Amino acid sequence: MRPIALTIAAGLALLTTSALAQTPDLAQSGLVGPLENPTIITDTAQWPKTFHEAPALAALVKAGTLPPVEQRIPQEPMVLKPLRQIGQYGGVWRRGFLGPGDSENGNRLRAADKLLFWDATGTQIAPNVAKGYEISADGKRTTLFLRKGMKWSDGAPFTADDFMFWFDDVYHNKELVPSPSPELSTNGKPGRMIKIDETTIVFEFDDPNFLFPSQLAGDTQVGGGQSRLQSDGRELGLYTPAHYLKQFLPKYASAEVLAKQAKAAGYDNWVQYYKVQSDWRLNKELPTLSAWRMTQPITGQIWVMERNPYFWAVDTAGNQLPYLDKAQLTLAENPEVINLRAIAGEYDYMERFIDLSKLPVFLENQERGHYKVHLDPGFNGGDSEIKFNTAYRLDAEIQKWLGNVDFRRALSLAIDREQLNQAFFLGLGVPSTPIPADIIPQSPGKEWRLRWASTDIAKANAMLDAIGLSKKDGEGYRLRTDNGERLRLQIDVAQTLSPTWPQQAEMIIQQWRGIGIAADMKLLERSLFYTRVRNDQNQLIIFSNNGSESLFLYTIPVLPIDPQSSLNGAAYAQWYTTNGAAGIKPTDPLLLKGYELLDSASGLPEAERTKVAQEIWKIATDQVWSIGLVGLSPAYMGTRVVNDRLENVPARTCVSQHCRTPWSGHPEQWFYK
């Protein structure tokens, strides 16, 4: 088992104003504000001495059904100085979602349960559930310090025992977690979790692992917060409510009774039953540490999360957070409906699915809809990119060409990126390979911005002829070399974050006609899209590489390293994470070199890690493992529609994957005027 080298890109000038020079019109638009966030107060001398609560909770305390606020918050709470002012209680945060496949929408509202998080820039680790951490000089031990007196949403103590239960009884149960987390090992050697006392946990490795604190804060398997064994098989987090979930494990309950309970609930076995019970989207009885606890599941027309009475953060005046009573997500048929509702002012804070190409309409309707528009440019090179699945095995002829670097390069050279930029990004993006912005230390350099990414139809045609695709049919389309039929590719598009991805795919398909390549676009519901990806049934997809600008924080868009999340070869990712015990070993020697470089990073100093990242980017760009289209824009969750009355919202927020927008803006301290 190999480590996924994910780390903080220290010094990553993520989201700095100077970077807007690459899109000067954005810099002058007035829609891009300064990065800002509330301040976490760590000096205990500045902490409030008395505490207050929402009126609804005060009524429950008076009725005797809830302990006083002083007994609900920890002795060591997280104290926030709100961004602009102390808020007031009440109100509902209205959002939209697209159904059961859109669970990530809610995950981002629950990032309060992450052990560590980030500052406003996304570059410095900040406390969260854990009040702090230490890493040993040799990098082999990371110590995590929890908050004394912290409680779950049902009032039960939250302690180191919740970590040890997860590690011993969940993580090491092969029926629940068949594949171990690569982040919990170094050089193929599993790490250990050790309880020191009720509020101290140590992660110990045989070899240096300087990256582990950043893994805890990043969008990684160990950085996911509360463990969620969701039905799709992905395992996240490092802790779970032992007092509640023990009842669903055969180790602590009768296997016969569990089997009967599972059958009665409509499940085949206790494993399926446990996963549902541990899934916050489906089980409203599951205790949580998040600011809001789910009260209506994702399966309905309305998905609701209500105030957690035991939430562990307060403001500098001693008011228990969050200020808002609940978050309510209303089902929409598709992203277009979400955009129409946002334009009509039916959402209070919405960035997910918002279509940048509709910016003029949003601006025109601001006053009528009682909202403001904010733009948060990203620093990833591909707000849209075409990803190749070289692990595709369902058609040997297609497989051959997807694995051919000159075929991939030719397809890239045939794309007119500026046409895409003007049509779908209002000219606010940068035609580009997937590499990050030039100011990012891990970027390989300006000379890689258009490597195999300029439009050259003549060269693309010549390359296709040279590799053996010279024969064409009467309409000019190239023929397969096995049976003489028309060679036809398929681009899978998820009904997901970008409303214009289907149209972008269609435009690319039209452009590819110029080099005799036929292709189809297939629009898929999000769950089905990911099912196909996890089974390597996809040939090409259109997606974003958001987050890849900090390569070791979110490597998934570049290399196939997670069987559940990677979009460019699930079988390769399975081979990588199991050290060759399962999956398919890549035949591409440069992909294997990419893995080796990635593995080497965990024990390296920062400067050397940066060089490793640059080398990975050079290989990925030259090999065109994905075709960058347009990037460095506010298209990917960087176009925000915010209710005029919603206060303490940042003028600009980090939208990188590890920042988990909208939680990067600390919505626990938002309130309505």
Image: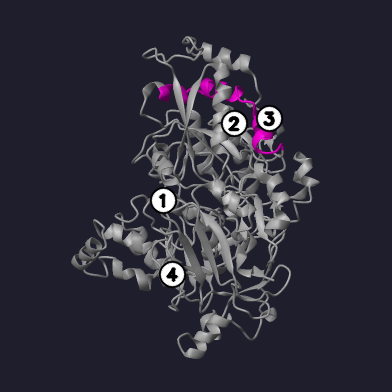
| Residue hosting label 3 | 418
> Residue 77, relative to residue 553: is it above or below?
below
Q: Does label 4 or label 3 sit earlier along the sequence?
A: 4
Q: Residue at x 58, y 29 (%)?
A: 507
**Foreground: disc 2 or disc 1:** 2
- What amino acid is labelled 3 in the image? Glu
* Magenta part of the chain: 398-427
**Foreground: disc 2 or disc 3:** 3
Question: Marks 3/1: CA distance?
Answer: 48 Å
Question: Marks 2/3: CA distance?
Answer: 19 Å
In this picture, residue 656 sits left or right of residue 16: left
Q: Position of residue 54 (x, y in %)?
A: 58, 80
| Residue hosting label 1 | 189
Q: Position of residue 413 (x, y in %)?
A: 61, 22
**Foreground: disc 4 or disc 2:** 2
Q: Under tag 1, what secondary structure?
A: strand
> Residue 284, relative to residue 604: is it above or below?
below
| Residue hosting label 4 | 195
Res 583 quadrant in image:
top left
Q: Callout 3 environment at 10 Å: few (<14), some (14 to 19), or many (20+)?
A: some
Question: Marks 4/2: CA distance?
Answer: 44 Å
Tell me if residue 379 can be seen.
no
| Residue hosting label 2 | 621
- What amino acid is labelled 1 in the image? Lys
